[in-house]
Amino acid sequence: MAISVRKGRALKRRFDAGVRSFAWYTGWVGAAGFALCGLLWLAPQSSWDGTLGLRASHWAVYAIVTLVAASLLGWSFVNIGQDRLEKRIGRGLSALCFVVLPLFCLANTLWPAAMTSEIGSDHRHHPVWLFVRWYPPLVTMICAGVFLAWKSKPRKRVYLDRALGFALLLAPYAILFAVMELGVHLDWLDESRRRTLDALGSGAIVLQIVVAFFISATD
């Protein structure tokens, strides 16, 4: 039994390491692609339409795909921030903050009936439901803040240029996080997403799974 547990833990560690490596390298490629999409948007369409197989009519698809890929870099930053925070607060408290409470929120989001019966209310402004709704996004934002604070102040003083640079790299993740987790409505993103899903057809489900997996939660 003990050997099976150890093998299971080792397998999970390898899986987590693989996911992080995939997110890190894909994120950098996506960031470069998203920056290129910005340049294409600024340039006249006639100057690049048809070049290297690019089509001006597909710009929205290029933008949303590279935005999703670039957001994986932000996901990596958030996880680095979580790692640093876990080291500060210790194993017991980190297990509570990053495992037990997120699972509690997830369970009550998926199966709210039991908690509704327990507290006698399903009103969204009830303290329990406010906690269930906002604890996971709050933890994610704190971890992002820890990462940015670390990168902007690696030594005794704050480096604003470093802070701005990493904030820009984190921006694609922040945009998708704001839309998916905070309910922010962005017309241009909704339109680009719709056109991308239409263009991808059956492959759109893969894009949606990737977005949901990386944006909805940290490790």
Image (cartoon, rainbow, N blue to C red):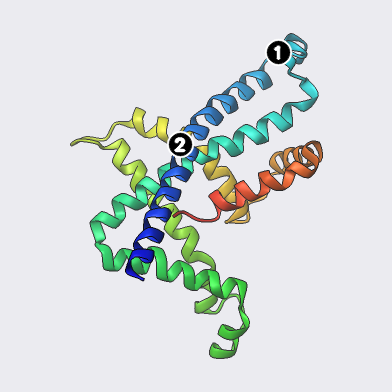
Disc sitting over residue 19 in the figure = none
Could you tell me if residue 170 is visible in this image? no
So how many labels did they put on this image?
Answer: 2
Quadrant where the C terminus is found in the figure: bottom left
Q: Are marks 1 and 2 in contact (CB under 8 Å)?
A: no
Asked where in the image residue 107 lies, by quadrant, the reply is: bottom right
Residue 168 position (above or below residue 43): below
Quadrant where the N terminus is found in the figure: bottom left
At a point 61% along the width and 32% down the height, the residue shown is 66
Q: Where does the image place residue 195, in percent across and percent down from the top left? A: 79, 38
Residue 38 or residue 214, whichever sits in front: 214
Specify the farthest residue to the top: 47
- Of labels 1 and 2, earlier in sequence is 2
Asked where in the image residue 201 lies, by quadrant, the reply is: top right
Residue 193 position (above or below residue 60): below
Q: Where does the image place residue 136, in percent across and percent down from the top left? A: 48, 62
Q: Where does the image place residue 116, in percent across and percent down from the top left? A: 59, 85
Residue 207 position (above or below residue 130): above
Residue that carries the numbered disc 1 in the rendered image: 52
At a point 67% along the width and 43% down the height, the residue shown is 207
Q: Where does the image place residue 173, in percent across and percent down from the top left? A: 53, 42
- Amino acid type shown at disc 2: Trp
At a point 54% along the width and 79% down the height, the residue shown is 126
Badge 1: few (under 14), some or many (20 or more) residues near its Cα, within 10 Å? few
- Amino acid type shown at disc 1: Leu
Residue that carries the numbered disc 2 in the rendered image: 24
Q: Is residue 1 left or right of residue 123?
A: left
Kindly state the secondary structure of the residue where label 1 is placed.
helix
Q: Is residue 44 left or right of residue 10?
A: right
Residue 93 position (above or below residue 208): below
Residue 144 or residue 95, whichever sits in front: 95
